Image (cartoon, rainbow, N blue to C red):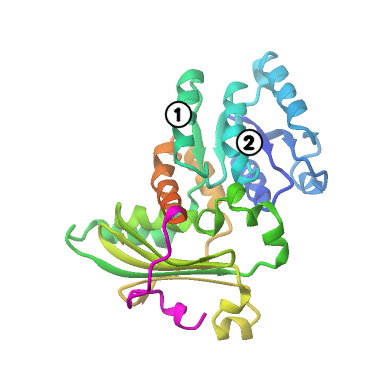
Amino acid sequence: MTKNFAIIGVGGFVAPRHLKAIRDTGNRLVAAVDPKDSVGVLDQFSYDVKFFTEIERFDRHLEKLRRGPEAERVQVVSICSPNYLHDAHCRLAMRVGADVICEKPLVINPWNLYALQEIENETGRTVHTILQLRVHPELMKLKETLLQESPSVRHDVVLTYITSRGNWYHVSWKGQPEKSGGLATNIGIHFFDLLVWLFGPVQEVLVHQSDPKRMAGVLELECARVRWLLSVDRDDLPEDSRLSGKTTFRSITVDGEQVEFSEGFTDLHTRVYERTLAGQGFGIDDARPSIELTHRIRQAGVSPLAGLGHPFLKSV
């Protein structure tokens, strides 16, 4: 059955992936809001979307639809707004009778999850989030392989994610930890979710470097030691990446073997939407471990390397 969608934050970077997922799952976008009006991208998907630049008018419109004919009501709200607004926008959506598909991170601080669960219980609506690496075909294969192993097996894992950002990043809300959650939350949340999903609960957290451009450390998980590095500094890219003009480098190795997952990213949001609409989405409890972990990372002091650091730390 076709569902009516609305979207919050339609002018943002990630919104086109949600717009595509709404269309490709056979659903209908009826309303959108963003404080910026550079939203011509909407015309690629529909000419009949009610657009607002004020969240209050958008809220009023959805409430009017809720009180009108069943066929016009919004059943799902997609949330692509800045991280610090996610929980407020989830509450808005549920209170106008809609379920939620929220871009990651679902919230910045773990205690906000309990408040969302209370609103779920009060309204009977459901919050889902985008944990897209869990539906990547190669990573799903790795998960199946790991499930066949003895629980006593521990792996050596190295995670590297470098995504070049200019000065705008640090001036925008993304560069403000109180609004983005910092690098660990803003650019690392889906990788930390992946690691806990693959290798089990967190046992220890060490941070070896933490500044506005770079974070690195070690995680002791149930079945792995993970040395990780996140960076938005182009100078941290490996030389061959820079020479070939690449602006992003992502790598996961398990016991020295590269996990190849560089392809297949273009339709992961659509796959998550398909699962969610089929009743198999990722909810608050799925999001909780990585949100708790990134909060611990933010609160951790910087520890000396002691020979355990990410290999790139020797050169950055």
Instruction: Look at the numbered disc 1 and give the secondary structure of its residue.
Output: helix
Determine the main secondary structure of the stretch shown in magenta. loop
Residue 177 position in % (x across, y down): 58, 52
Provide residue 197's location: percent of width, then percent of height. Answer: 35, 52
Give whichever of discs 1 and 2 has the lower sequence position: 2
Determine contact: label 1, label 2, CB under 8 Å. Answer: no
Please check the rendered image and state whether residue 14 is part of the magenta-colored stretch, yes or no. no
Q: Secondary structure at mark 2?
A: loop
Residue 26 seen in the current view = no
Q: Amino acid at mark 1?
A: Gln
Q: Is residue 122 left or right of residue 255?
A: right
Q: Which residue is mark 2?
A: 27
Q: Which residue: 56% across, 49% down?
A: 269
Q: Is residue 241 above or below residue 220?
A: below
Q: Camera-side residue: 269 or 45?
A: 269
- Specify the segment rendered in magenta: 299-316
Q: Nearer the viewer, mark 1 or mark 2?
A: 1
Q: Residues within 10 Å of mark 1 (few under 14, many from 20)?
A: some
Is residue 288 visible in this depiction of the protein?
A: yes
Residue 267: x and y in percent read: 57, 54
Neighbor class of circle 2 (other Cα within 10 Å; few <14, some 14-19, many 20+) is: some
Residue 288 location, quadrant: top left
- Identified by mark 2, the residue type is Asn
Q: Quadrant of the N terminus?
A: top right
- Residue 310 lies in magenta, yes or no? yes
What distance separates the C-alpha of mark 1 from that of mark 2? 26 Å
What residue is shown with label 1? 117
